[in-house]
């Protein structure tokens, strides 16, 4: 099991690194969103935690967004343990927005109304 986990982390990192290299080569701004901790299996929370620690240690932390939050009051997954709830979508939207704003990843053009003088 341990060998499979280490292999999986390295394999996942190679995929992420390939995407980052492509983005850098093409001058594309990017954000890496970590996994949600689904609760439909016993091992998945542990694997997601490991991924959430491993990947940011290998890449620019400014562009990595943790895909979960320890919140015992809000359900982040539907009853099947796989699909995300609206609370999860709202959480991720806020996290992505903060990352976009903090890292100035989006340039907003201010429109001047023809009514302004």
Image: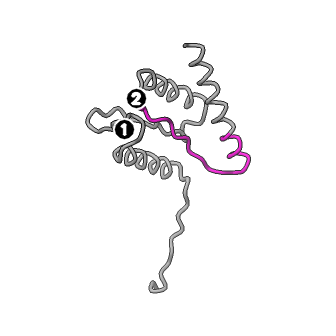
Q: Quadrant of residue 73?
A: top left
Label 1 sits on a secondary structure element that is loop
Farthest residue in the right direction?
25
Residue 5 location in percent, x, y?
Answer: 56, 19
**Mark closest to the chain's N terminus, 1 or 2:** 2
Q: Tag 1: Cα neighbours inside 10 Å, few (<14), some, or many (≥20)?
A: some
Q: Nearer the viewer, residue 6 or 104?
A: 6
Rendered view: 103 above or below 72: below
Residue 72 location in percent, x, y?
Answer: 28, 32
Please state if 73 lies on the left or on the right of 64 as rendered.
left
Residue 77 bears which disc, if any? 1
Number of numbered labels in the structure image: 2
Residue 87 bears which disc, if any? none
Residue 97 location in percent, x, y?
Answer: 45, 51
Label 2 sits on a secondary structure element that is loop
Figure colour scheme? one colour
The region drawn magenta spans 19-39
Q: Tag 2: Cα neighbours inside 10 Å, few (<14), some, or many (≥20)?
A: some
Magenta highlight on residue 84: no
At 57% across and 30% down in the image, what residue appears? 55
Q: Nearer the viewer, residue 28 or 92?
A: 92
Residue 40 bears which disc, if any? 2
At 63% across and 24% down in the image, what residue appears? 10
Query: Marks 1 and 2: CB-CB under 8 Å?
Result: yes
The mark closer to the camera, 1 or 2, is 2
Farthest residue in the front direction?
80
Please state if 21 lies on the left or on the right of 101 as rendered.
right
| Distance from Cα at disc 1 to Cα at disc 2 | 9 Å
Q: Quadrant of residue 43?
A: top left
């Amino acid at each position: 099991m341990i060998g499979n986990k280490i292999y999986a982390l390295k394999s996942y990192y190679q995929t992420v690194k390939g995407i980052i290299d492509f983005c850098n080569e093409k001058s594309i701004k990017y954000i890496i969103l970590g996994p949600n901790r689904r609760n439909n299996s016993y091992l998945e929370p542990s694997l997601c935690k490991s991924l959430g620690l491993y990947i940011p240690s290998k890449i620019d932390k400014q562009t990595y967004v943790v895909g979960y939050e320890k919140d015992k009051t809000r359900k982040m997954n539907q009853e099947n343990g796989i699909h995300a709830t609206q609370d999860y979508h709202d959480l991720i939207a806020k996290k992505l927005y903060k990352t976009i704003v903090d890292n100035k990843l989006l340039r907003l053009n201010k429109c001047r109304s023809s009514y302004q003088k």
